[in-house]
Image: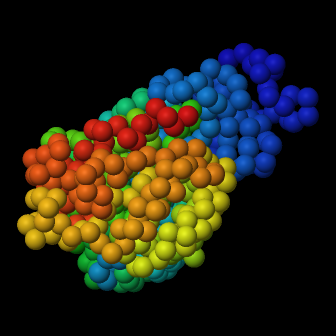
Amino acid sequence: MSIDQSLHPMRDRQPLTIVPNMPSNSVGAEGDVVLSMADGTYYQKVQGIWTANGGPGNGGGGSGAAQTVRNIATRCRHNYQLSTAATAVGSRTYHQNMGDDVASIQVVIGNWMANNNGESNGPALSTEYLAVEYPSGVYHLAKWSGADFTTCAAGANVITDPIPVSLRHGDGFWVHRVQIFPSDVQIPVSANAVIAPSSVEPVASYIWTNAQWTAVTDDPRAFVCGTAFTGGATGGAWTIYPLAVLGLSSVPSVVIYGDSRASGRNDASSNVAQQVDFGSWGMGEICRSLGRALPYTNCGCESDTIQSFAASHTLRAQLSRYHTHAHFQYGINDLTAGRTEAVIQAALQTAYGYVPSLKVSQSTIPPVTTSTDSWATVANQTVAASNGPRAALNTWILSKPAPLWAVFDVASVVEDPNNPGKWRGTDSVPAMPAAITSDGTHETPYAYQMIQRAGVIDPTLFV
């Protein structure tokens, strides 16, 4: 390959290093410049991220903007629940590359959790094994500084070396991970709201007690490279997802901060129009819309509040470095806890400031009601006492206060237009064919899909 030095972005004052592949974000100093011989692209280290500055770049779903190393995958999540006492957990999670075509990827995993009680470290130092499956049945073992496994300190993240797997825009792939602790502990995992149908994630998770793990004779590398888990038990909801899957891309990527409605509580594959809709794209008010076009990390979790996030947010805010946009979906749990709209507004604006380099958006807040007929009708619902502050908060959100670049009116899709504060029902105009909430707080899968189909969250606006 001939090297055109005129493409070197800082040729007048910065030395150039030639490397075989896209570098890891964990190496290099600010301002360094390298040329990757694998793709003929120049990269410069900018704010800790290797950014493409020249060369042919990669094709795919890009917008024509500059390529940087960012999250390219759907269905990335943080952990927000604890397992029963166990020593090891294994997972197989499904994702799609919604970024540009890539020649290699890096996977970000963590040893921590965050929920409505704030953020907390994992229980101890963990040992980590990981592989990427693509295409189906072909495994690419991850390495860390050339080793087949690594350790991750409690409260830390680790990033794999570049994994040489070529993914086209839209390709589906699986991340296999085994996480091991020194003894039986409660391991941070994702909650049961996020399990995909078996057609997408067969045997999505597995778990071992210390006694079971001690008796296992298989090498963990075999578990992440296709051999069926043995010696423990299926883990049910105890799945561990990557925090991000990094690749060189120009496609906007979104980190979502919010509560159970963002996480997708009560969303389930059995009640959606197409099973793959859930398995491929994601769940909840936000990700069903975004996942069809954009990569994302979903940091929504049950019962969380903006007050809790403001008090303890560092680990989740750090994920912003892998994204270009941040979406906030907080509010309902603060309202039902009796906080005023002024208090919630102040907390939201403080939280927006935790991701100053990203474009920030916010969605409006659907209602909370009780019902005497399982929410079949509008007439038999009673509006929650928090509805007045909710309406005022939505009015403020719709005014698009700084620094928001966009607002998405989710509430307008599911709230009855003639009875503010109530969910649409079979006596709405238009009438709903079935109840769109089963508990007065969370949407049903049908209602989550209503939001997506209404187009109120338009992925094409994320530029």
Scheme by which the image is coloured: rainbow
Judge by depth and name the residue closer to the eye, 298 or 373. 373
Expressed as whole percent of the image width and height from the top left, the position of residue 287 reads 37, 48
Q: Is residue 30 above or below residue 236?
A: above
Expressed as whole percent of the image width and height from the top left, the position of residue 201 reads 24, 51
Residue at 25% x, 57% y is 419
In this view, the residue farthest toward the right is: 13
Could you tell whether 150 is left or right of 186 in the image?
A: right
Expressed as whole percent of the image width and height from the top left, the position of residue 322 reads 57, 49
Could you tell whether 24 is left or right of 414 in the image?
A: right
Q: Is residue 131 above or below residue 134?
A: below
Residue at 10% x, 59% y is 376
Expressed as whole percent of the image width and height from the top left, the position of residue 158 reads 55, 60
Q: Is residue 461 above or below residue 58?
A: below
Judge by depth and name the residue closer to the eye, 297 or 93. 297
Could you tell whether 269 is left or right of 37 in the image?
A: left
Quarter containing the C terminus: top right
Asked whether residue 335 appears in the rendered view, the answer is yes
Residue at 31% x, 42% y is 452
In this view, the residue farthest toward the front is: 418
Could you tell whether 106 is left or right of 202 in the image?
A: right
Judge by depth and name the residue closer to the eye, 412 or 28. 412
Q: Residue 290, located in which quarter of the rendered image? A: top left
Asked whether residue 227 appears in the rendered view, the answer is no
Quarter containing the N terminus: top right
